[in-house]
């Protein structure tokens, strides 16, 4: 028998340590190749560690929530050539043939484990019957009665019940699953993405002297254009939300106010300006906030921008966002419009120097050319690093964004 040592992988990008956020195996468990062993969290993304070998877990060298150095021993697997096949998610012993094991990627297996779904019960729609994330979503929506379990009598393992949040469209834990009983206090560790979010927010507030600027924007004409474009082209090109228009307005306004499209190294006391706009778009997930980056905003058309936002949003929702989609933003956009609220004070995404925040659209009576008219009004609540951006400069930038949005034809003029 030989031992295979799995070390904390070098994620790159200067990452020196990671946090172990979830173990999927215990000492003594049998594992197969490509089986997910653990989830680790870097500053930018969660990464699953798959098993490169088949064998038995001999030793685990870190606890959940522990921060470990890159290159250190994570766990040891004893390789047993004559070991019996481990049980899969259905509890059925597998043979050594690949046909006996449901085909699925490590991230799909992780999603199935967290949802308590037996992969053997799910009909895969991918190549060679591979189970995809979409198949798991369909299984959750339709229930086991429509899947193979209805015929085979299999039962999924019990797991944390999750329901759909009607406000955000995201899955969330069933109320009561993790709540304390009356007269009790429930103490849970802050780990994983939630810990990273907290660390990043604390760093931003410690380093950046924030100030916020709020302006109201009449988006009546913009909303009329958006509805008209969706009515004509949605089936062919996809749905347009407000975000592609705002991102285009930001990219145009940056030409006049380039200092907002920058990153400040306060240790070296240097400011790096960028000739292209890489916009971080804040997205809420079940686990917390992630900020994937839409690169080269000025090079995207409306539908191209919308498609990229939708792609990243789906990946974020499924927990599959990659490190390539994160980091190195030059300015950020956040939106609470769908959740309500007329004013917010967003935190600048360190080391950027500006963030644009959108609030909900409301109908209000306004004076237009001397007459009262009902208009659609949206507040832009934005924050800036006051070491780099002065109040007048910030106001000028937001007024430029406002000008493009209130006269949407100018969004398409070069």
Image (cartoon, rainbow, N blue to C red):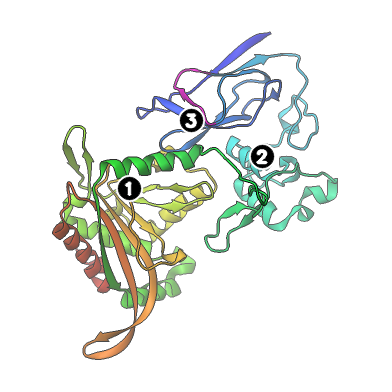
Q: Where is residue 254 in the image (x, y as percent from the top left)?
A: 20, 56
Query: Residue 19's mark?
Result: 3
Q: How far apart are marks 1 and 3 (CA)?
A: 28 Å
Total numbered badges shown on the rendered structure: 3
User: Can residue 301 be seen from the camera position used here?
Assistant: no
Queried whether the magenta region covers residue 71, the answer comes back as yes
Q: Nearer the viewer, residue 45 or 198?
A: 198
Badge 2: residue crowd in 10 Å (few <14, some 14–19, many ≥20):
some
Q: Are marks 1 and 2 in contact (CB under 8 Å)?
A: no
Q: How far apart are marks 1 and 2 (CA)?
A: 33 Å
Q: Residue furthest bottom?
A: 371
Q: Are marks 2 and 3 in contact (CB under 8 Å)?
A: no
Task: Give the mark nearest the N terminus, 2 or 3.
Answer: 3
Q: Residue furthest front?
A: 183
Instruction: Tell me which residue sits at (30%, 49%) in the image.
Output: 348
Task: Give the mark nearest the N terminus, 1 or 3.
Answer: 3
Instruction: Tell me which residue sits at (59%, 53%) in the image.
Output: 172
Q: Do the residues labelled 1 and 3 touch (CB within 8 Å)?
A: no
Q: Where is residue 34 in the image (x, y as percent from the top left)?
A: 61, 28
Q: Magenta stretch: give its range.
A: 65-73
The mark closer to the camera, 2 or 3, is 3
Q: Name the residue under label 2.
A: 113
> Which quadrant holds the N terminus?
top right
Task: Give the mark nearest the N terminus, 1 or 2.
Answer: 2
Query: Residue 266's mark?
Result: none
* Residue 257 shown left or right of residue 378 in the figure: left
User: Can residue 213 be seen from the camera position used here?
Assistant: yes
């Amino acid at each position: 028998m030989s031992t295979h040592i799995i070390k904390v992988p070098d994620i790159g990008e200067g990452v020196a340590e990671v946090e172990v956020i979830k173990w999927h195996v215990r000492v003594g468990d049998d594992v197969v190749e490509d089986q997910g062993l653990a989830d680790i969290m870097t500053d930018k993304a969660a990464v699953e560690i798959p098993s490169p070998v088949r064998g038995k877990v001999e030793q685990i060298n870190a606890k959940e929530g522990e921060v470990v150095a890159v290159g250190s021993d994570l766990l040891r697997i004893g390789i047993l050539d004559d070991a019996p096949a481990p049980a899969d998610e259905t509890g059925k012993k597998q043979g050594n043939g690949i046909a006996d094991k449901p085909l699925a990627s490590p991230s799909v297996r992780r999603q199935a484990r967290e949802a308590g779904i037996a992969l053997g019960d799910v009909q895969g729609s991918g190549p060679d019957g591979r189970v995809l994330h979409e198949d798991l979503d369909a299984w959750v929506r339709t229930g086991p009665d429509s899947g193979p379990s209805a015929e085979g009598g299999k039962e999924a393992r019990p797991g944390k019940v999750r329901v759909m949040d009607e406000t955000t469209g995201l899955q969330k834990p069933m109320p009561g699953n993790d709540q304390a009983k009356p007269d009790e206090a429930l103490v849970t560790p802050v780990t994983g993405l939630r810990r990273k979010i907290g660390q990043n927010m604390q760093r931003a507030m410690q380093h950046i002297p924030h100030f916020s600027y709020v302006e109201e924007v009449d988006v009546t004409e913009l909303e009329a254009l958006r509805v008209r474009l969706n009515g004509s082209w949605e089936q062919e090109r996809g749905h347009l939300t407000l975000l592609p228009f705002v991102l285009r307005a930001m990219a145009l306004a940056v030409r006049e106010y380039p200092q907002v499209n920058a990153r400040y190294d306060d240790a070296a006391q240097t400011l790096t300006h960028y000739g292209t706009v890489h916009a971080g778009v804040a997205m809420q997930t079940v686990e917390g906030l992630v900020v994937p980056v839409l690169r080269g905003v000025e090079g995207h058309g409306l539908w191209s921008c919308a498609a990229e936002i939708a792609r990243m949003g789906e990946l974020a929702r499924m927990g599959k966002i990659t490190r390539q989609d994160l980091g190195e933003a030059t300015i950020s956009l956040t939106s609470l419009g769908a959740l309500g609220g007329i004013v917010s004070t967003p935190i600048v995404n360190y080391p950027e120097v500006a963030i644009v925040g959108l609030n909900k659209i409301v109908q209000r009576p306004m004076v237009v050319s001397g007459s009262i008219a009902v208009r659609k009004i949206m507040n832009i609540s934005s924050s800036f690093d006051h070491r780099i951006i002065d109040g007048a400069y910030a106001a000028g930038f937001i007024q430029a964004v406002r000008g493009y949005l209130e006269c949407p034809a100018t969004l398409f003029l070069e």
